[in-house]
Image: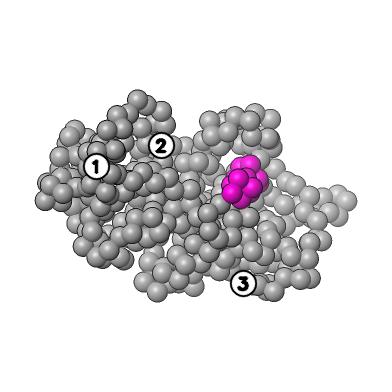
Amino acid sequence: MILNDRGIMLNKVWEIQGSFGLENLKQSTRDLSESLNPKEVLVRLTATSLNYRDYLMVIGTYNPRQKLPLIPCSDGAGVVEAVGSEVTLWKKGDRVLPIFAQKWMDGAPNMDNLRSTLGGPNDGCLAEYGKFSEEGLVATPSHLTDAEAATLGCAGLTAYNAVVSFGGIEPGADVLCLGTGGVSLFALQFAKMMGARVIITSSSDEKLARAKSLGADETINYSTKNNWERDVRKHTKMAGADLIIEVGGAGTMPKSMMSVKPYGTIALIGVLAGGESTLSLYPILMQGVKVQGVIVGSRADFVKMNRAIEQNKIKPVVDKVYGWNEVPEALQYLQTGKHFGKVVVSWG
């Protein structure tokens, strides 16, 4: 924390200034008042992880109407610096993680909940300090570093809900994870925790070998197997997968529909291969397939996931850690798709 010439504390931040684009993501400072609302918590942030949503927000694709300036990044980790007079959940020194949708406590969300998300439309975690409501935080799993824990809020919780809450996975079920990004690798870990068999895809044999070391039972290189849906069928004794972690979107959805078993579930999470397309709905209709959109989760979901992570000593897969001054480089690396797991920025 630094002071300006009037003695006011300043918060170091990265923010999108003026217009969208990586060239407009710049370091800045904002006034940081010492006063806290009675139920508010001041957190000294130490790390954030990058989601593809963050990159799209910076370049203006995610929400072209987003008001600027905006501090990006939905995920964060840090330490409680101060608490308001009525805060009972936290004390100075507690390690905490902000939740993605600050007003979504439990159950199904409403539109007000979904407008309370960090990193757009509200300021995110790419800052030295952040203020949150006491219920907008959860405890950090004790066996994780802040850099590791900063990956949990979006990618981790999305995967957990896809596998555990919506997937209904039982021991012996077949789960197909598309790609080796953060959500897919978390889904691999949670599916193995539930006793499932996991099939995973990638265009890189090196990444597939690494996924195998994390517990993947079968691997498919989709750059050499154009009809990878046939391989999924073969790996499932022609039955199809019980659950598919679909991060490609329109570009991969037709193959996912051919890979899922009758009455199976496609957890639609990302649109890395496109968000719009003409799709035949016959496979969904004729096989009773459930397509479930997954939008991260509530505070209650986050708490449940963290219990499971602590009980099973799950460690997030972190590909690279960048420093405070390397944020644009980190986002550019994320955009290339070369990462295996999560890309993190750490400064604490």
Q: How far apart are marks 1 and 2 (CA)?
A: 23 Å
First in sequence: mark 1 or mark 3? 3
Task: Point out the image quarter for the C terminus.
Answer: bottom right
Q: What residue type is labelled 2?
A: Val
Residue at 54% from the left image edge and 44% from the top image edge: 326
Q: Where is residue 13 in the image (x, y as percent from the top left)?
A: 66, 47
Q: Name the residue under label 2.
A: 271
Q: Position of residue 194 (x, y in %)?
A: 30, 65
Q: Position of residue 312 (x, y in %)?
A: 36, 71
Residue at 19% from the left image edge and 39% from the top image edge: 229
Q: How far apart are marks 3 and 2 (CA)?
A: 36 Å
Q: Mark 3 points at which residue?
A: 94
Front of the two marks 1 and 2: 1
The furthest residue to the right: 6
The answer to whether residue 85 is left or right of residue 334 is right
Q: Is mark 3 on a helix, strand or loop?
A: loop
Residue at 69% from the left image edge and 50% from the top image edge: 12
Residue at 53% from the left image edge and 54% from the top image edge: 108
In this view, the residue in front, 325 or 303, is 303
Tell me: residue 81, above or below residue 75: below
In this view, the residue in front, 274 or 46, is 274
First in sequence: mark 3 or mark 2? 3
Q: What stretch is highlighted in magenta?
A: 110-123
Q: Which amino acid does label 3 sit on?
A: Asp
Residue 169, quarter of picture: bottom left
In this view, the residue in front, 45 or 2, is 45
Mark 1 and mark 3 in contact? Answer it, CB < 8 Å.
no
Q: Mark 1 points at which residue?
A: 287
Q: Is mark 2 on a helix, strand or loop?
A: loop
Task: Point out the image quarter for the N terminus.
Answer: bottom right
Q: How far apart are marks 1 and 3 (CA)?
A: 49 Å
